[in-house]
Amino acid sequence: APVKAPVPSRAALIVAAALLAFGAVAAYWKWLLPAWEITFGLFALALLADLIAARTLPPRLELERFVPRSVPIGRWRDCIVRVHNRAPFAARCVVYDHHPAACEMEGLPFTLTVPANGFGQARYRIRPTERGDLTLAPAEARVTSAFGLWQIPTRVGPTQVLRSYPDFAKLADFALFATENRLSNIGVLRRRRRGSGLEFHQLREYREGDALRQIDWKATSRRGRLISREYEDERDQQIVFLIDCGRRMMARDATLSHFDEVLNSVLLLAYVALRQGDAAGLMTFADSEPRFVPPRKSRSTLNLFLNTLYDAQPTLRPPDYHAAAVELSRRLKRRSLVVVLSNLRDEDEETLFPALALLERKHLVLFANLRESALDRVRAEPVKDLEGALRYSAGAAYERDRAQATQRVQASGAMLMETLPDKLAVSLVNRYLDLKRSGRF
């Protein structure tokens, strides 16, 4: 059913503009007035007849929208729209799909000519810029009237809710590179291990470069040739992510916020850990409703992560590291690698160091500290005026305080890595694999 009053079409507006120009000329040359009056009358009659016909025979359109129910944030996905015409005459329409503000669109609006009792189809692209539930409202189709002088707005199609998740598409990219042994293309370093793992795997023939301590002398004497022991990384460990949802995570360097980069990185490292035979869990803090997923190593773990985090948003609260550490220690009974993902400030010391001391009694702690790329840009900009000098000085003071805070974290015994948000995922994977190969975890 029509939802708005009909609007004149572009063709009608062009004719009306031409008639106005004709009227201005006729006002100067009076002998043209009769012709103008006849032309204007015919145009007005055509407008009225076309409007009555459009009201008498309203459009009978239906719309189907084919779009993935789950869409990763920051990734383009196709949306197919099929418009069915239930009327015995063809319909030409312009379709405006009503997308949420948290989405970018390409290919809208589009024009279709739908045959009588048939359908037409078009495609556009959608890219979420925020996570959570995104509502696609019914579309608006502006159907051109029989004479082409009016457009009849009509609401068509259902209301659909999409879920915008953290970027799980990166997991498929990682799996593809891992399958093709091209992980170095995305920055993951594969260092050779020379018998330094923790668990014995198998015996094999000696290879050039094997350490002497790898040689199994009993097997060598039995077989009459050098035999080496081969080790593998210890399995059945636990990795738990402690995710800061405080106000600093709202910072945005590019398309995604720091918080979104953290969630994408958590998914990737959880995927890698599960492939390594470890269990993965998470806990959030500094948010309105803290979320907890106990460590588990089943195939459904990643889906549980996605469904737990997809609508999590950073808040205006400051992070309370000590309260988070107390809660995590209460829930976590087994030794784990605890990865704290946050953005450190010098004012955090009051709650941070008691938290690290508490966690390090039982767990291995890695603090992943996000660094704003804006700091690098400020340092690289030439100072040309007083405002630039003040900006540079403020940035230098901030970096000095931050460096002192990170040094104190390292002095406390915790491991610390500082990285730009868009480099966080690969940096975390490399550090995790290094810890596995070194035997510390």
Image (cartoon, rainbow, N blue to C red):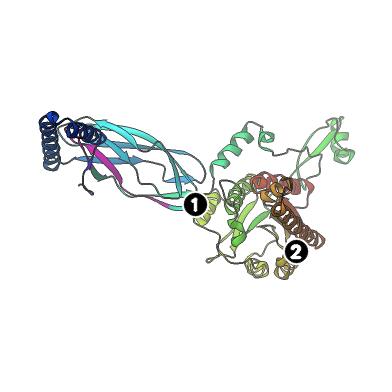
Q: Residues within 10 Å of mark 1 (few under 14, many from 20)?
A: many
Task: Please provide percent x and percent y for residue 258.
Answer: 61, 52
Over which residues does the magenta segment extend? 134-152
Q: Quadrant of residue 397?
A: bottom right
Q: Residues within 10 Å of mark 2 (few under 14, many from 20)?
A: some
What is the chief secondary structure element of the magenta stretch? strand
Disc 2 marks a residue whose amino acid type is Glu
Q: Is residue 275 above or below residue 178?
A: below
Q: Which residue is mark 1?
A: 131
67 or 437, which lies in front? 67
Q: Earlier in the sequence, mark 2 or mark 1?
A: 1
Q: Which residue is mark 2?
A: 360
* Residue 233 badge: none
Task: Please provide percent x and percent y for residue 227.
Answer: 83, 34
Which mark is in front, 2 or 1?
1
x 59%, y 46%: residue: 254
Q: Is residue 318 magenta?
A: no
365 or 12, which lies in front? 12
x 53%, y 66%: residue: 288
Secondary structure beneath dot 1 equals loop
Q: CA distance from mark 2 to mark 1?
A: 33 Å
